[in-house]
Amino acid sequence: MLLVTAVALALVYQHLNKPAQSHAAAATPAMAVTTAAARLQLVDDSVSVTGSVSAWDPLSVGAEVNGLRIQSVAVEEGDFVRKGQPLARLNSALLTAQLKQARARLAASEATLRKSIQPNRREEILALAAALAQAEANVAQGEAQLKQARVNLKNAEVNDRRYAELLRVGAVSNQDAETKQVAADTAQQDVRGSEAKLTAARFMVEQAREKLLVAQRGGRAEDVDISRAAIAETRAQVQQLEDEIQQTVIRAPDDGLISGRNAHIGDITAAGRPLFSMIRRNRLELRAQVCDLDLPRFKAGQPVRISTREDEPGKVVGKVMLVSPQVDPTTRLGTVRIALPANAGLKPGMFVRGQVLLGHRQALVVPVSSLVTRNGASFVFTLDGRRAVSRPVKVGAPGDDVVEVTSGLSPGEPVVAAGARFLSDNDTVRVGDQ
């Protein structure tokens, strides 16, 4: 009896509920949408490229004179400098003293030439004797400098070995060990320079002694030639020292932006060590790697829209500057160099995307509002009677108000334009005015 009663109640409930469900279904409103037909139109033909921003012509500025201490630094990173502007100054005291000595030797050589030409007199012989004394004094000074340089070298080598051992056990940093190694190399160069100077000074002593003997015996034609040769040699030394003193002022080789500074007061200059990095004329570029099949489509002068984020439209406009004449045989990629505007806020090392505009082509497009992207898939809604049916599509380059469809639609097919993003598959729709 209980079972019969339950079945009866269930039948009564279904009978009473059917009208309510039918009424609710009939009352569900259809969503109002508008449609637009997929159509062919001219769109921008473009190729996407990526890469890092780099300097158009990076410059490394170093010292031409080795073994001198940096006395002052005049610029910082981010400064824009002009060609010839001083960047740093080196201590030129030693070179200035050597220049004074060379000028003194030049004056002595010129006096010797005059005395070689004129009849020898007592005062001439005394002058030659003074020149010899000066040359011998230079030898003594050179010997003292060489001795001091060797002592410095010995100390530097001891410190170098000691710091190398400490570096091996992790007691000091690599920078400290490298500093001691550079000091040892500098000391070695000082020894070599002192030895060369001492050799030259001894040669000058021999010349001065020979001139004095000749003057005591009387002037000859050979003496005049020797004196002139000595003058030429000394003048060359003076010119060399003057050039080296000018090189103690490190100047900008061209207009540009200081992108790196490795110069610090007290550092010792060394060959091959850059002190400053510059972006020549503050010009930046994007070096994009392009497939060999697309490379012939690039021409100098083509505009490029640059963006730093994938979801950001390209507001910065660059220009194709140079297309590589060759392709890497391994990767089948060629390089396209794209000039970037200097005032766009881009920095070397930034990763950017570029859209290179190659011209126009015919493409199938739909309104941007009709494209729906969910879970990484793109689709549009077509109509099957009063029902909206989703259609997967593949899209190409987006425009301002339309988007290219590369597959999934045919020209003339209607798609839901307004209201597509609020629909689900098989929703009931009502087409309004287009």
Image: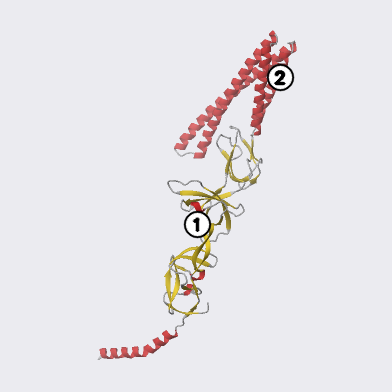
Q: Secondary structure at mark 1?
A: strand
Q: Is residue 78 above or below residue 373?
A: above
Badge number at residue 110: 2
Give how far across and how far down residue 63 sits, in percent.
60, 36
Give how far across and how far down residue 167 sits, in percent.
47, 37
Query: Callout 1, which amino acid?
Result: Ser
Number of other residues with Cα within 10 Å of mark 2, as a class: few under 14, some 14 to 19, many 20 or more: some
> Nearest the camera: 133 or 407?
407
- Discs 2/1, front: 1
Residue 195 placement, left or right of 386: right
Dividing the picture into quarters, in which one does residue 10 lie? bottom left
> Nearest the camera: 142 or 324?
324
Query: Callout 2, which amino acid?
Result: Glu
Q: Quadrant of the N terminus?
A: bottom left
Residue 374 placement, left or right of 216: left
Q: Residue at x 71, y 12 (%)?
A: 125
Specify which label sits upstream in the sequence, 2 or 1. 1
Between the residue at mark 2 and the residue at mark 1, the CA separation in whole angstroms equals: 73 Å
Number of other residues with Cα within 10 Å of mark 1, as a class: few under 14, some 14 to 19, many 20 or more: some
Can residue 143 be seen by looking at this rendering?
no
Residue 91 placement, left or right of 120: left
> Nearest the camera: 358 or 80?
358
Can residue 316 be seen by looking at this rendering?
yes
Give how far across and how far down residue 258 sits, in percent.
61, 45
Q: Residue at x 66, y 22 (%)?
A: 232
Give how far across and how far down residue 237 sits, in percent.
65, 25
Q: Which residue is mark 1?
A: 48
Q: Secondary structure at mark 2?
A: helix
